Amino acid sequence: MEVAFRPSHADATYQAKYGIQASSGGGRASARETIGRVAAGAIAKQLLAKAHGTEVLAWVRRIHTIEADIDPASVSLEAIERTIVRCPDPEVAEQMIARIEAIGREGDSCGGVIECLVRRPPVGLGMPVFDKLEADLAKALMSLPATKGFEIGSGFGGTLLMGSEHNDAFLPSEDGRLRTATNNSGGIQGGISNGEVIQLKVAFKPTATIRKAQATITASGAATTLAAKGRHDPCVLPRAVPMVEAMVALVLADHLLRQQAQCSLW
Amino acid sequence: MEVAFRPSHADATYQAKYGIQASSGGGRASARETIGRVAAGAIAKQLLAKAHGTEVLAWVRRIHTIEADIDPASVSLEAIERTIVRCPDPEVAEQMIARIEAIGREGDSCGGVIECLVRRPPVGLGMPVFDKLEADLAKALMSLPATKGFEIGSGFGGTLLMGSEHNDAFLPSEDGRLRTATNNSGGIQGGISNGEVIQLKVAFKPTATIRKAQATITASGAATTLAAKGRHDPCVLPRAVPMVEAMVALVLADHLLRQQAQCSLW
Amino acid sequence: MEVAFRPSHADATYQAKYGIQASSGGGRASARETIGRVAAGAIAKQLLAKAHGTEVLAWVRRIHTIEADIDPASVSLEAIERTIVRCPDPEVAEQMIARIEAIGREGDSCGGVIECLVRRPPVGLGMPVFDKLEADLAKALMSLPATKGFEIGSGFGGTLLMGSEHNDAFLPSEDGRLRTATNNSGGIQGGISNGEVIQLKVAFKPTATIRKAQATITASGAATTLAAKGRHDPCVLPRAVPMVEAMVALVLADHLLRQQAQCSLW
Amino acid sequence: MEVAFRPSHADATYQAKYGIQASSGGGRASARETIGRVAAGAIAKQLLAKAHGTEVLAWVRRIHTIEADIDPASVSLEAIERTIVRCPDPEVAEQMIARIEAIGREGDSCGGVIECLVRRPPVGLGMPVFDKLEADLAKALMSLPATKGFEIGSGFGGTLLMGSEHNDAFLPSEDGRLRTATNNSGGIQGGISNGEVIQLKVAFKPTATIRKAQATITASGAATTLAAKGRHDPCVLPRAVPMVEAMVALVLADHLLRQQAQCSLW
């Protein structure tokens, strides 16, 4: 029996590019691939913590239409890990879980937004032109499966402000440390970390694998329909939280080593 | 007289990283730096056009709160270049120009969103894991000055859909060419182009340089205020359109060469 | 008991760089590491053979003072693999084997020279400035353990000729194919393959591990003596032949892909 | 009139690869290209000197058959620069100059060997597997025009020694600094610098451009003869000395930054 391409999966593009595709499970396109990233990220986190006391935390900010507005100053790993949905607001978390279960029962799926912050980042990370810190973060996060968007600091919403509202005023300091009154920059200015909390958001699309029947084609182009069987996750976000943290930690660790090479010889 | 750090510029982070900063004009942080990208992008566009008839087009979709909903099927370079604001809808363009002028008169600035599409892209561009096509596009675009966000296909808005709404059904075809009924994927699935139009959006923050007085600090940390003098662009978007096209063309040309190396030996 | 650094091994430099070293067997400095290179090289050889009928052959040219002058036109894999020492001249091979055994009985070791040729290489491989083909070959081969020298074409001996003797006259051809009367260039001119046989030589030092007692120091700098126990190869060259072939094949395959990308779009 | 390919130049391979060639002067294949390397190398030398008191010195060791055996311990920049041929032994230098002039008068050319040493190199530079320090040095030097061979430490000559003669015994030290009784390793063991003087040699072929008539072909393959006119250097070695120093300094500076990144975070 001829294979049917699963809509919005990598099946068809892999077939077009390589002439083959994984017969099951998505092969390299499976999110299982990220296990190596998460393992490496765990080491990067330790390196960042030891070198600068840096902490990387991510959580689920929105599931479908249910959004939690989390205070970056008080969010903790403990609060994030308290619920299975990895949203640190317990009431919103409950609503998210209910929504995911309801959508799953219909054989459908949903997406959402993961937010991530970096506390006590080293100052000076990032390069001025092509390897800007936000550029490397964007690539790292958009290389995760199912991602559709990336925001640093104020993101798309910041484009509705005027310059006088958006600019982050520098606060006087006695130790020369940079501090800003607001943080629309998301901790990065001119491609380089300024020491404020790094803040970013990542959009994850609804899971492509659903039990509902969908129109698609076979490898030879003939029309068919397809409905996934078995257990499928109606929402990837809770499990993507550690992936986001890992990718952010890896980018920061890379740039920390580059900074060490470039700016600490004497 | 001691230099004052311009808020939300690269002055302070350059000083922190390098111990120096450009005394005027922003140095490497100036958007003047992108002239080399635009020049290289012009060659990349010719290469893409000659090899595959590929066309890259960008335009201003939103200025501050004024948005144009452009039909990707009919937008043309001619329509984009007809107005100075590079928005192909002439009525909306007029409102955008008026808004920019009004904000400029107040000594303030504004941002917005640039949209970009790629017609007739080669199928198969992109790598399955780290160098996914959308990842390299995200890095390229987030390396442009003043960018705060990136979206491919449905972007953040797509996270409000359910899987059954978001998935792009494959259409039957006689020539084996992939075609989808919708294009929430933005022309990329599993990190690899599927031949549909590639669609992306980029958020640009309001220009950091404004004539209005702002609170800031000197290099030694003392409080001061700063107001830019002279002519300053209250909105960078119209001039960022060619930069966006250039970066997209460069990423596609790179991946076209990689595809040629990897998948065309025999 | 404190570890003694083995002379001319990686023990001491690993300790200095990393603060640790493999407690036995040399760790990453062991030639066992090359198994991955040889495996990858086997695939590269198949790719080169399929794409261009290219053949990569290496053999032992010299062991200690015993040298074989092999005719590149007639050497074959079969002749190379006929003896355990991988020298295609059976009489010289016998002498080599006797020399290695004699030196081994004394608890000592010896080195020598491996020669390699590439038949029917693609024309045009290599970049004009930094990634010249001979430069990448040199790096690849000098990254093998125990290598001390690299020659392309005429090598060090060619420096004793005058220009009129060394230059390779081009021969008239009807098909436009480049052919030269001599091949002092070793198949590469201006960093780029000209289609003639690529010829190179690699020097391998005598095995550092010997059973004879040697003066050395412990990790804390105290004088001691060291004599290896157990079975140790008194000569690495026969087993380095597949490593040389593998590295050459990998470099050529890489450059074939780059050539395909750069010069075959239309 | 159709262009004739200059024997052993890049003309023919550039034509084969790119379909064009520089109409005069060799284009990118000209040694003029190395001016950027020498300029960058001058900065790398300052960085190495400031960071570690490292000194890089190269000189002409052999011209055609005339060889100078220079004591690495006493050679100085002043002695090297005293003669136009950049050989620090004044008597041998005179013979070299006479040889070059005699060969030049015949319309012919000659090659030779440049030797280079690095005093007080940082310990620990180099990577254990692919980016071994000698591998990166080999690539850097074999990317210079006209190079045919590279040796680190004992080089090809070292293959005539037995292991017990070749191994560098470690000397007792009170400060833990590595020191060896001999230096056949050329300052690098296991791909990593051990702090002893780094020593290497590079073979340069006789200049390809000569006034003597040579057999060659035109771009369409027809037989012709060619004799260079005008002033041509009958020997490139004296002018290649700064190129060798520059490439060595650049490789060491790169590895110093990598070492700083990898081994100095805490």
Image: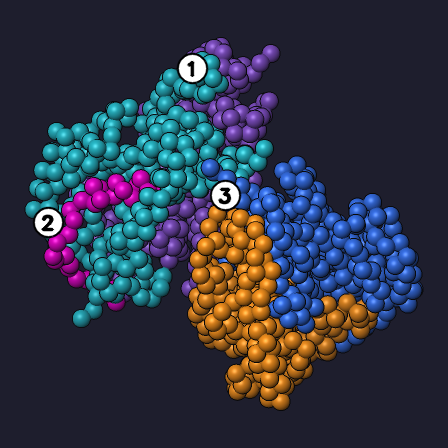
Chain colours: A purple, B cyan, C blue, D orange
Provide the residue span drawn in magenta.
Answer: B220-247
Seen in the image, is B85 located left or right of residue A64?
left
Query: Residue under mark 1: which chain is it in?
Result: B
Whether marks 1 and 3 lie on the same chain: no
Alpha-carbon span between mark 2 and mark 1: 52 Å
Is B166 rendered above or below residue C27? above
Q: Would you say residue B224 sits in the magenta stretch? A: yes
Mark 3 crowd level (few <14, some 14–19, many ≥20, 10 Å Cα): some
Of pointers 2 and 1, the one earlier in the residue sequence: 2
On residue B107, which mark appears? 2
Seen in the image, is B8 located left or right of residue C200?
left
Q: Would you say residue A200 sits in the magenta stretch? A: no
Task: Say which residue appears at 37% left-offset and 35% top-offset.
Answer: B49
On residue B171, which mark appears? 1
SS type, badge 2: loop
Could you tell me residue A76's position as x and y percent? 41, 42
Image quarter hosting the N terminus of chain C: bottom right
- In this rendering, which labeled residue sits more in front, label 2 or label 1? 1
Q: Report which residue position mark 3 lands on.
A: C263
Alpha-carbon span between mark 1 and mark 3: 35 Å
Task: Say which residue appears at 85% left-offset and 71% top-offset.
Answer: C213
Amino acid marked by disc 1 = Leu
Whether marks 2 and 3 lie on the same chain: no
SS type, badge 1: loop
User: Does residue D123 appear anywhere in the picture?
Assistant: no
Is D32 rendered above or below residue A222? below
Task: Say which residue appears at 49% left-offset and 55% top-offset.
Answer: D3
Query: Residue under mark 2: which chain is it in?
Result: B
Is C39 rendered above or below residue B62? below
